[in-house]
Amino acid sequence: MEKTEFNCNLCEGKKNSFLFTNYDHSIKSNQTFNIVRCTNCGLVYVKPKPSNMEKYYLDNYEPYNSTNKDIYFSLYKILMISFYKKKKNLFDLLKSALCQILYSPPAARSGKVLDIGCGNGGYLSVLKESGWKVYGLDFSQKAVNFAKNKRGLTRVKQGNAETLKYPDNFFDLVTMNHLIEHLSNPKKALIEAKRVLKKGGILAITTPNYSSFNAKIFVKNWFPLETPRHLFLFETLTLRKMIERIKGLKIVRIRHDYSTYCFARSLGYFLGNKSPINCCLMIIKIIFWPYTIFLSLFNRSDIMTFNISKVGD
């Protein structure tokens, strides 16, 4: 396997401690990857990085395929549309309040939004129906074609998160939903996102939380590892450090998610994906929801979202 030199993206440190060896759960292969922790700042990442990352994104990769039939996506769509309605009846107000509790939309008003790593465009389609002027970017041409041809999202294009070809101060909202952990240079992508964001605009980053309780108990079977596609595994502290080192960005809120999706998938991995567990994932998600809510209260759930304001250049 060809490999490339890959140092800590947070502090540029070259020294690290070995944590464990992992493999790609989605591809039947004997290929393994080393997970290490920077001895200086604590950032966890894959080292060395495979040189040809494209081959690890198969055609059946979930973010590239439609998930409109998922009950969670359907609920999200209903609540978000109600949240952004200008004229709300009583039922809309109730749904809007529930939306704020469950999802905490990063911006209260619609405007121009760029979703970096938009995948098949599901999230953007919801924002479009909610009144946003939507733009999307993804490195997969297949995903871009789906978003354009199946969802009618004309402003979606193929591109690189670390070199955004948009004007300065152009967007009211920039989102990175499960994107930053895939990038070779997350810090550069954050700087680019800040550049295209208007002053006072919001950058919303959602990523797995490696300081979660489930990451500790499932270890190699923790679903959000997604080795080797997730090159960096951020903890609340390490992502905070990276953002705070970029002048002009200010963290306004950190939210830890209630979703049980990662727990259910991790349990499936732990049981070898041969158990009836895979036939009743929805039941598991519902049963363990109180458990995930409890973890979120202590910032130990699987997914975290940072809302970041641009306060200057």
Image (cartoon, rainbow, N blue to C red):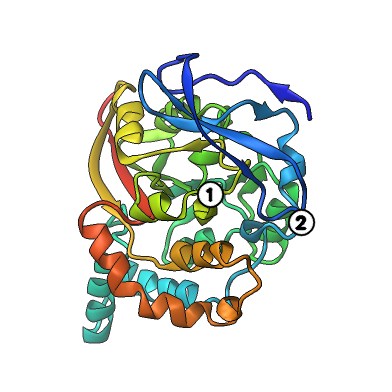
Quadrant location of the N terminus in the rendered image: top right
In the image: residue 206, left or right of residue 147: left
At mark 2, the secondary structure is loop
249 or 231, which lies in front?
A: 231
Earlier-in-chain disc, 1 versus 2? 2
121 or 266, which lies in front?
A: 266
Residue 202 in the image: above or below residue 255 = above
Q: Is residue 111 visible to the viewer in this orientation of the structure? A: no
Q: Report the residue at 77% width, 42% height from top.
A: 55
Which residue in the structure is indicated by mark 1?
220
Q: Report the residue at 32% width, 44% height from top.
A: 306
Q: Position of residue 180 (x, y in %)?
A: 49, 39
Residue 275 in the image: above or below residue 128 = below
Alpha-carbon span between mark 1 and mark 2: 24 Å
Hey, what amino acid is under mark 2?
Asp
Q: Position of residue 212 (x, y in %)?
A: 35, 50
